[in-house]
Amino acid sequence: MQKNGPSVQQALTEAIAAFTNEEVLVQGAGRTDAGVHATEQVAHVEIEKPMAAHQVQGALNHHLKPHPISALKVEAVENSFHARFSATGRAYRYRIINRRAPLSFDKGLAWHVARPLDAQAMHEAAQYLVGRHDFTTFRHVACQAKSPVKTLDLLMVERQGEEIIVHVAARSFLHHQVRSMVGTLELVGAGKWAPQQVQEALLARDRRALGFNAPPDGLYLSRVRYDTPSMPRDKTTVG
């Protein structure tokens, strides 16, 4: 149970149990903390009841009501497939609404930053983080990953009107890594940090060198990639 209500995993587990009468374990491709969103999430589950994929999808969506969760596609996969460990890449995007006026329709769906931000400076600073690095500075103290070393394939910042979008992609991430990077880049955008200070923070390998964590509201898991024969390279199962 998450602080604001049942987790997506719990909602899926209860929905599947409702039409199979089975105790199942739902395995997702990546965790989303309370307040974080997913426009593309992949999960796998083993059920004994003989059902076609389209029947599972229909029953699942019926029993997921009224949760804001939808099974966009369901298909049978090989027994060797694992939603998390078979994934070869994940992409997130982070939404910042940069204006003085408070949020209305986007409340809870983006980070509202009232002070002006320089998206170009944020993008420049972000490039110091691309590649293979020790991301200890951007790692939550409770992170259980064996190593702080990760390879960041993409970190791009762009402005679209009042919205600043941060795009990030890697095979995997440390706990709170994306939010830690975005919070630090916001300091650059606000002129509080020079772009090269992000590199200094990275090289410090010290959580105390971090700016701060961006709130969860603006973070979206947007893509999960697979290279296995049993799955298309990009597949959405639950969103």
Image: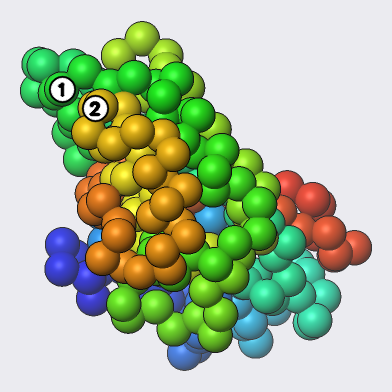
Task: Give the percent coordinates (x, y) of residue 81.
Answer: 76, 75
Q: Which residue is situated farthest in the bottom direction here?
A: 23
Displayed quadrant of residue 164: top left
75 vs 72, left or right, is right
Residue 19 visible in the snapshot: no
Q: Residue at x 22, y 33 (%)?
A: 192
**Mark number, residue 115:** 1
In the displayed structure, would residue 209 be above or below residue 51?
above
Q: Hey, what amino acid is under mark 1?
A: Arg
Task: Give the percent coordinates (x, y) of residue 2.
Answer: 22, 70
22 vs 140, left or right, is right
Task: Give the percent coordinates (x, y) of residue 85.
Answer: 68, 75
Spatial separation of the CA atoms under disc 1 and disc 2: 7 Å
Residue denoted by label 2: 190
Q: Secondary structure at mark 1?
A: loop
Residue 139 visible in the snapshot: yes
Q: Nearer the viewer, residue 73 or 100?
A: 100
Task: Give the percent coordinates (x, y) of residue 220.
Answer: 42, 45
In the displayed structure, would residue 56 be above or below residue 148?
above
- Quick check: marks 1 and 2 in contact, CB under 8 Å? yes
In the displayed structure, would residue 231 be above or below residue 144?
above
Q: Nearer the viewer, residue 99 or 107?
A: 99
Displayed quadrant of residue 210: bottom left
